[in-house]
Amino acid sequence: MNRIDDGRPGRREAALVLLDALESGTRARAAAGTPTPTCVGITGAPGSGKSTLLDALVRALRRSGETVGIVAVDPSSRRSGGALLGDRARVRSGAHDPGVFLRSMAARDHLGGLADATWASVAVLAAVFDRVFVETVGVGQSETEIADLADTLLFVAQPGAGDVLQFMKAGVLEHPDVFAVNKADLGPAAERTASELATGLALSSRGRSTWTPPVLLVSAQDGRGIDALLDVLSAHREHLHVSGEATERRARGREALVSNALERRYGSYGVERLGGRPAVCARVREAPEVSGFALVLALGREIEAALGRAASAADDAARP
Ligand SMILES: Nc1nc2c(ncn2[C@@H]2O[C@H](COP(=O)(O)OP(=O)(O)OP(=O)(O)O)[C@@H](O)[C@H]2O)c(=O)[nH]1
Ligand SMILES: [Mg+2]
C-alpha cells in the first residue's frame, strides 16, 4: 500500500506493475475455483451510520471466521484528521485483530487521485482478505465511482432522510443494490423512511437487472437486522453469479475505471489521441484477460507516444 501510494513520478509505473500482479493473482485464484472476495460499497449521507453499521457487519463476519478489509474514503476533506481518527475508532472491531484491516483515505492525501487510490487499495485488499468494503460519503462523483468499483452497492439511509420525491430527485435510487434504513431503534420514523424508499424504487426505472433492491430496517446500535442484511448481501452476490451479471458488471466497471484513470492522467485531449472514451472502452473490452492496471499502463504509453509525436510535429512546423 505504501508503494501504490507513492505518487512521485516514475513510481507510478512500479505501482501499476505491482497492482497488475495482484489482480492477476486474484484472477488465477478465481479460475482455480477458489472463492474471491466481492467488493461491497457503502454510501449514504453524512451521519447516517455507515461506519457504525460497517462495524456491526464486521463483528458478525469475524464471528463466522471471515477476514475483512475496509477502505474508508472521505472525498470532501471537509473533516479534520481528528475526525478521520474518530471514524477509525467507530469501526472498533479491527483494533487488535489481524483479521481486519482499515485504511482511511482523505482527498487531501491523494490530490487528484482519490479514485485511483481507492481502486488500487481495493485490489490490494482483495488479494488478502475474504471480504472487502468501501465506505464513502454519498456526494456526487464519488458515488458513481464507487458503483464502478463495487460488486454490490449498499445505501444507508437514516430515519427522516426524505420523501419519495426527494429520493428520486437526489438520484440515490439509481445505483444501489441494497437499501438499509439504519437507526431502526428510533421507532416509527425509520419505518416511514423505509416505505418512502420502497415507493420511490417502485416508481423509478433501473436498468435491465432482474434484481429487485430490497429495503431493510436495521440498527447498528442494537443489532437488529444485521444478520438479515448479511443474508441479503450474500443473496446479491449469488444473484450476480447465477444471472451472469457479475461478468457484465465487472466489465463495465473496468471500462469506466480505466477511462477515468487515463482521463485524470492525460486529460480528455490525451484520451482523444486514442479515439476518445468509446474507443478506449472498446480496447478494454477486447482485452478481458489483461488487468485494468496493465491497461492503464499500456494505453497510457500509447497516449504519451501520440502526444510526443504531436509535440515534435508542432516543433517541425515551427522550424523555419
Ligand atoms: N440511535 C442510533 N444511532 C446510531 C446508529 N448507528 C449509528 N448511530 C449514530 O449516528 C452517528 C453517526 O454514525 P456514523 O457511523 O459515524 O455515521 P457515518 O455515516 O459513518 O458518518 P460519516 O462517515 O461522517 O458520513 C453516531 O453518533 C452514531 O453513534 C443506530 O443504529 N441507532
Ligand atoms: Mg463514517
Image (spheres, rainbow, N blue to C red):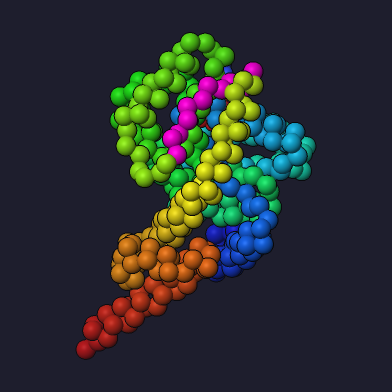
Can residue 123 be seen here? The reply is: yes
Quadrant in which residue 21 is drawn? bottom right
Seen as rendered, the residue at the extreme top is 188
36 is higher (above) or lower (below) than 283: above
Q: Position of residue 239 (x, y in %)?
A: 52, 43
Left or right of 199 on screen, residue 83? right
Which quadrant does the N terminus fall into? bottom right
> Looking at the image, which residue is at 64% across and 44% down?
131
Residue located at (58% from left, 65% from top)? 20
151 versus 276 height, above or below: above
52 to 209, vertically: above or below: above
Is residue 166 rendered magenta in the image? Answer: no
The answer to whether any part of residue 43 appears in the image is: no
Q: Residue at x 57, y 14 (%)?
A: 185
For residue 234, side relative to residue 303 (left or right): right
Q: Is residue 219 magenta?
A: yes
Locate residue 63: give its quadrant.
top right
Residue 45 position within the rendered picture, expressed as x and y whole percent measured from the top left:
45, 29
Prevailing SS of the magenta stretch: loop
x, y percentage for residue 182? Answer: 53, 23
